[in-house]
Image (cartoon, helix red, strand yellow):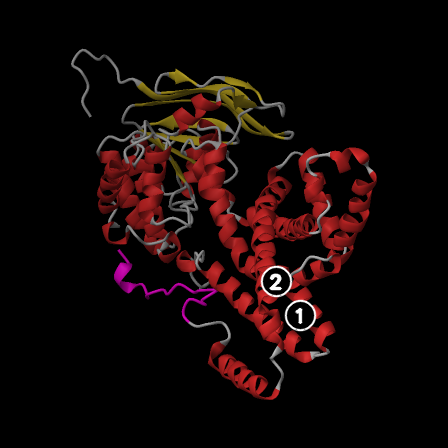
Amino acid sequence: MTDAAKPALQPVSVLAPTKAPALGRWGWIILGAFAVYAATTMRWDWLLDYYPKLLWGLLATLLLLVVTTALGLAAAIPLGFVQVVGPRWLSVPARTFCSIIRGTPLLLQLWLLYYGLGSVFAANPEIRDSALWPLLRQAWPYAVIALTVSYAAYEGEVFRGAFAGVAKGQLEAAQSFGMSRWHIFRRIWLPQAFNRALPTLVGETILQLKATPLVATITVMDVYSVAAQVRQATYLTYEPLILISVIYVLFALLIQRAFAAFSTTRYMRSPR
Amino acid sequence: MSLSSDAVASPEALHVEGIRKSFGSHEVLKGIDLTALQGDVVAIIGGSGSGKSTFLRCLNFLEHPSAGTVRINGEDISLKPDGHGNLAPSSGAQIRRIRSRLAMVFQSFNLWTHMTLLENVIEAPVRVLGLERKEAVLQAEDLLNRVGLGHKIHEYPSFLSGGQQQRAAIARALAVNPYAMLFDEPTSALDPELVGEVLKVITALAEEGRTMVLVTHEMAFAREVASKVVFLHNGRIEEQGAPAELFGNPQSERLARFLGNFQ
């Protein structure tokens, strides 16, 4: 056997943030220095009045992110899968959906849903009288739908590639051992597709985070809209913007950490 | 292997009749009959494009034959037209049950890369055959030891050499206690120096009486381990028989010429 002669192969981690924070040591030093500068030379007294609102805004942003990525992912997996194996009556609509959503600005989708659909609903007495109206008259359901749909379309495309990229031989092997289609999907195809999609999903989820401030345009009180309020009330331009910038950076780091927990690069090795 | 004293003949592990397969207008298999008795090692040889692999894949319906019947361990696989001019198994439950005991070993190993060797080996026993996990793990450790990979059970396939991966794939196949094992050119994707270790494992299996159907290009190996050799040419069985006869005294000119390539 050739075991002894084989060089030891080390797994390569694509994500690796479990070892070092993605900002890096200098990143933190610069951020820290800036924080000291900002704390000593800028005005922060407004925080006393606004911190409860800011915390609620933070919560709203975080909830929007978590809920829409979770729902979006749940939709993206079948959207991608049917484009690879589905009959035409499923794959064509899925592809069309992904193309249209990816091809139009999120801001537009948000407004079409909220102002367009929202006003149609408002004009319809049956809907106004229905039990759903208390929900539909608010802004956040439209924000959740728009962000979910957008994430689903982008990630549907990612999953299409990921599913298509899983080696056919491995699926055949599964078939040859008498596994059912569902078994093959759940145990072989999906886990490998997910692992292939993972590095892309990290970046896409950070993009999703940075898309959330758009919901301020339809009156959802996320962390950005609180900062805008502060600006209008206090005439301070930079302080609130700097504060939420730092918050977004920290959220982005959090996303990287969260995905690293799913990291499955342990079984991959560098190409020879 | 033990046979009761009054048994006249070994039961058939595998019996196929009239297997045909066309891809479009191109007929790859033109009616093939084959019987493998319990403990038989059938080696299928032939040039590239002769239909060897296609035939093997028709046995467990990874490929749908255009015509023919397949009987595994005395049970006919029920078939129906698949709408593309071929025959598909008509009962999903039946074909899954039969496949689960007809283990296949592939040219490109096809281990599941997101699972360790141990996980690869216990997957089908636990989740298809319903074996207790503890029992499956013990069995898997034993099998991986037998193929010389006892020290690699928690390793992922991509960290292993081709020979090691193929030996692990053989352990995975053995784990379902197969009626018959199907080998599809098991050494063709290996570096020359790794071929021997895989052939050694397959030889050991032949010696313990495993029923096997092997598609191979390793003539010396086929001659050594096979109980029966089948030479395919242009989708037909050109010649078949005991290895000593077939290799020592080929009847057809085509077989003689084919074997000449390996001198």
State whether residue A105 is above or below residue B14.
below
Q: Choose top left, top right, bottom left or bottom right for residue B42.
A: top left
Q: Position of residue B80 (x, y in %)?
A: 55, 18
* Residue closest to the far right: A123
State whether residue A19 is above or below residue B220.
below
Magenta highlight: main SS: loop
Q: Position of residue A209 (x, y in %)?
A: 61, 61
Q: Is residue A4 magenta?
A: yes
Q: Label 2 is placed on what type of residue? A: Gly
Q: Which residue is mark 1?
A: A227
Report the span colored magenta. A1-19
* Left or right, residue A163 beside residue B160: right
Q: Position of residue A223 (x, y in %)?
A: 63, 65
- Closer-to-camera residue (A247/B223): A247
* Residue closest to the far front: A49
Q: Position of residue A210 (x, y in %)?
A: 64, 64
State whether residue B25 is above or below residue B221.
above
* Left or right, residue A93 beside residue B191: right
Name which residue lies at 65% across and 34% down.
A87
The 10 Å Cα crowd at callout 2, few under 14, some 14 to 19, many 20 or more, is many
The number of callouts visible is 2
Name which residue lies at 29% across and 17% down.
B11
Mark linked to residue A57: 2
Q: Quadrant of the C terminus of chain A?
A: bottom left
